[in-house]
Image: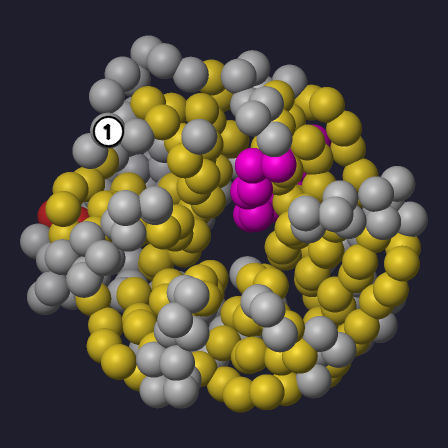
Amino acid sequence: MTQQLLAIDEGRQRLHLIDTQNPEAGWSRDMADFPLPRALQRISPQRVLVGFDRGFVELDIETGDVLHVCERWTGVTAVQRLDDGCTLVAGMDLDGGNNGINLLKLDRDLYLMAGVRREGDYVRGMTRTDSGYLLCTNDHILETDFALQPVRKLAAPGFEHAWKAHRYADGSTLVSAGYGGFMARFDADGQLAGTFGGKGQVPDDVAPFFYASFVVLENGHILVANWQGHGEDNGHKGRQLLEFSADGGLLGSWSDAEKISSLQGILPV
């Protein structure tokens, strides 16, 4: 596995630029000032957008230096910069209410343009589609329109803290199952088409525990972060980064237990 990527180590609350073939390359920075980082998006050749509990920060990819910070809330779980320069911010009770999922839209100058809310007690990843959003709401993916009105649910046995959803051009959807420790495919009609990467489908040393962030590469391969638990000393428990073929076969894996405890967010750069 050859890959340079940004990696969130949730266990040690650090962000790394790593090269899986060169452990001396890259950089590492403490994220104490930006707690609970989860979302990663490359927004230019030099910049990455990192969502964290209170908002988001823009960092220089080459150095890890802070370029801009926006922190106004508590409970942010996902952010996304749109092509027009606007920013979407998703999370829990961002408007000060209780038991609500919020989605806010900020303009290019980070002024609030619009906000929508729906009842709910959990959300992690947020993916924008052509017609609305895919919201990871624990035991299912809630597909909504742009007003967060429900359209349908995507669910599979074993979903617990489902983390991220990816919509393919053909309308099918790929989901990381969180504590289920597997990846799930849904067809364009929202029906479960199959799973891969779970226990019994991969070698024992992979130790599927919590499939968190994942990335679909240009060649169709799928990189998955195999998070292993809270705390500083989990890196030896399983293989931290997995690469699957487009049809779900395990192609390779990577770990660095000295550097990383619990890999949660990943972004190839």
User: Which residue position holds label 1?
Assistant: 2
Q: Is residue 204 magenta?
A: no
Please state the extent of the stretch shown in magenta in the rendering: 31-43
Residue 210 position within the rendered picture, expressed as x and y whole percent measured from the top left: 34, 58
Disc 1 marks a residue whose amino acid type is Thr
Would residue 93 be found to the left or right of residue 257 on screen?
right
Image quadrant for the C terminus?
Answer: top left
Residue ID at (13%, 57%): 249
- Residue drawn at 69 percent across, 84 percent down: 149
Q: Is residue 26 above or below residue 104?
A: above
Task: Assign the magenta stretch its main secondary structure.
Answer: loop
> Relative to 214, does residue 125 appear above or below in the rendering?
below
Seen from the viewer's position, the closer of residues 76 and 19 is: 19
Left or right placement of residue 47 versus residue 160 in this view? right
Q: Is residue 95 left or right of residue 187?
A: right
Where is residue 100? Give x, y as percent: 74, 75
| Secondary structure found at label 1 | loop
* Rendering coords of residue 154 (x, y %): 44, 82
Tell me the residue at 75%/68% (across/down). Answer: 102
Q: Quadrant of residue 128?
A: bottom right
> Given the current orientation, which residue lies at the most extreme top position?
24
Q: How many marks?
A: 1
Give residue 89's position: percent from left, percent from top.
72, 56
